[in-house]
Amino acid sequence: MSEINEAYAYFCFGMKTFAVLFVTIGLVIFSCGPDVRKATIDSLPDTVAVLPLKMQALDTIEKSEIELRMESLGLVDILSLDSTFRVDLRYSSDQNFTGKDMYGQLNRCYLQKDVAEKLLVAQRELHKQFPYYSLLVFDGARPVSIQRLMWDSVHLSPGDRQKYLSNPENRSLHNYGAAVDLTIIDDQGRELDMGTPYDFFGELAHPRNEHENYTAGKLTAAQMINRALLRSVMRTAGFTTIETEWWHFNSCSRVRAAEIYPVIP
């Protein structure tokens, strides 16, 4: 077990001391289910993937009309609560499944205040376990008008389309500022390897299929552990998962959101 942990240290975290890594990796491994713990013992983890990362100097960008409208509805910019969050709104660029900038002048990540405070709890929990990690947020509050554009951009059958995107007529929790898409990055700005990119349309991104994909060799032990770490800190903060996207977390049910939050037009 010590040899595997040491290998994990060299592959994933570089020249960190073995004693520190034994404690920190142990916290993740033994907070996971038995399948993930067994995967760690039976298979040598891969290295952390180095993925492209787009960061904007948001403090130099004046707030746009859509962002001011978000604030008028009571939503908050998550960076106003904690500057250690990292934000890379993928729909505010062409680096998304549509290949188009869907958000225009929406550059900041907004959430309902209580949802943002939950996310702050998750960030602090992550820092407690791994001080050199941070949450990287891909998406937060999303106007219904943009939801419609995205819905029309997905070239899938109606059944498959609803696996990955909410019908704008039914609303998404993103349309209330009550859901967040995110991952984890290290102190070099590298995304942890989760097995697929963000917004990957396929069963390899499905949390419900992780055990089968690991057994089939489609997911590695390192990828399983990275996903488990993300879920662990988010669940600690009160978020829940969905079955088809490892990156998506809900703060409450859609029914509850409709009761307590205004929809973002």
Image: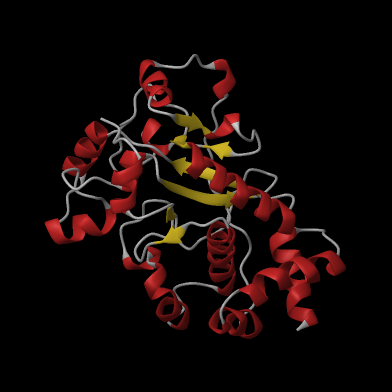
Instruction: Judge from the rendering whether residue 24 lies leftward or rightward of residue 177; answer left or right.
Output: right
- Location of residue 136 (image quadrant): top right
Could you tell me residue 258's position as x and y percent? 29, 45
Q: Is residue 55 above or below residue 40?
A: above
Inspect this view and state whether residue 93 appears.
no
Inspect this view and state whether residue 114 appears.
yes
> Which quarter of the rendering shows the N terminus?
bottom right
Instruction: Judge from the rendering whether residue 231 lies leftward or rightward of residue 180; answer left or right.
Output: right
> Which quarter of the rendering shows the C terminus?
top left
Instruction: Judge from the rendering whether residue 91 lies leftward or rightward of residue 191; answer left or right.
Output: left
The residue under the point 73% across, 49% down is 132
**Extreme left residue here?**
158
Could you tell me residue 147's position as x and y percent? 25, 39
- 128 and 162: which one is in front? 128
Could you tell me residue 133's position as x and y percent? 67, 50
The residue under the point 63% across, 63% down is 47
> For the image shown, how many numbered marks are present on the structure?
0
Q: Is residue 188 above or below residue 75?
A: below
Instruction: Judge from the rendering whether residue 88 lies leftward or rightward of residue 244; answer left or right.
Output: right
- 235 and 140: which one is in front? 235
Q: Is residue 254 above or below residue 3?
A: above
Could you tell me residue 83's position as x and y percent? 64, 33
The residue under the point 28% across, 40% down is 98
- Location of residue 221 (image quadrant): bottom right
Q: Is residue 148 above or below residue 165?
A: above
- 254 and 41: which one is in front? 254
**Extreme front residue here?**
259
